[in-house]
Amino acid sequence: MAERKPLLSIRNVKKIFKTRDGELEALGDVSFDVYPGEFVSIVGPSGCGKTTLLKILAGLLLKSGGAIEVDQANFDPAREVGFVFQKALLLYWRKILDNVLLPVEILKMDRAPMKERARDLLKLVGLQGFEQSYPKELSGGMQQRVSIARALIHDPKLLLMDEPFGALDAITRERMNLELLRIWEEAKKTILFVTHGINEAVFLSDRIIVLSARPSRMVQALDINLPRPRTLEVRTLPEFGQYALQIYNSLEIR
Ligand SMILES: Nc1ncnc2c1ncn2[C@@H]1O[C@H](COP(=O)(O)OP(=O)(O)O)[C@@H](O)[C@H]1O
Ligand SMILES: [Mg+2]
């Protein structure tokens, strides 16, 4: 992978929030690269700035220092980023199909040809037949799958996912992990995935970026060389446990 150009190069990114009580240094100094097609996870203690970093990458927040370089020849960060939040955040008064089409309206794309794509994406996330339903008629896991379809509608190269399965029950979460890997493989996306689930990160990722407590620094970048496609059997491999242990160690959980 060394000869390939990173899609995203995060260089010494810092974020200081100015609050009523003074300055709060959230991101101390964070640097790493994300290559096209990679699945990279970020783990770190609560409050270390994971959401802040994703918001900076999505252009929702300004950084206080450092640089973010993108491969502009192959990637337009204004139009080719999809964001999945911890909550599905669907508009309750819109049908599922119209929720998926929301970014199309925001980006002022032509809606008519995208309808077919929205239907295909709902199929991809296993929600065929729910196009005309309302969000309240779907379970939490189904709503989160709608939000994944919505994040994919404008065909973004990069998906930024902020603890997207954090609010789901354990069984739904397992299913969503498998579903996400299937979508990632099928749609050939690059994913930057924030989670506090260490086993989840090992299961999903090509690489895990471990951040320290605030002001956060990268304490480890761990390549996960487990076979793909990942199946549940992967979790029984001794290497799986070794990887998880390495992360526990660098987070100083003992
Ligand atoms: N808009 C804001 N104004 C001031 N402080 C903020 C703001 N957003 C986040 N913070 C602070 O920055 C730190 C990192 O927050 P966040 O990125 O949400 O952490 P994480 O997602 O890793 O749990 C926290 O201490 C939080 O209180
Ligand atoms: Mg967060």
Image: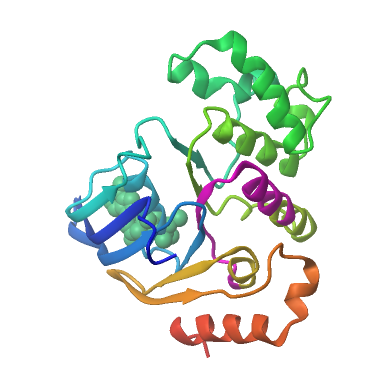
Way the structure is coloured: rainbow
- 186 horizontally vs 45: left or right: right
Query: Farthest residue in the front direction?
Result: 3
The foreground one among 70 and 15 is: 70
Q: Tell me residue 78's x, y (percent).
A: 35, 32
In percent of width and height, residue 239 lies at: 65, 84
Q: Is residue 140 visible?
A: yes
Q: Residue at x 68, y 31 (%)?
A: 121
> Residue 31 location, x and y as percent?
29, 65
Query: In which quadrant is the N terminus drawn?
Result: bottom left
Residue 196: within the magenta? yes
> Quadrant location of residue 88?
top right
- The residue drawn where x is 36% and y is 73% is 213
Asked if 252 appears above or below 188 in the picture, the reply is: below
Location of residue 59 by image quarter: top left
Looking at the image, in which quadrant does ligand 1 appear?
bottom left
Q: How many marks?
A: 0
Toward the viewer: 44 or 203?
Answer: 203
Q: Which residues are magenta?
A: 178-198
Q: Does residue 94 appear in this view?
A: no
Pick out the residue farthest to the right.
129
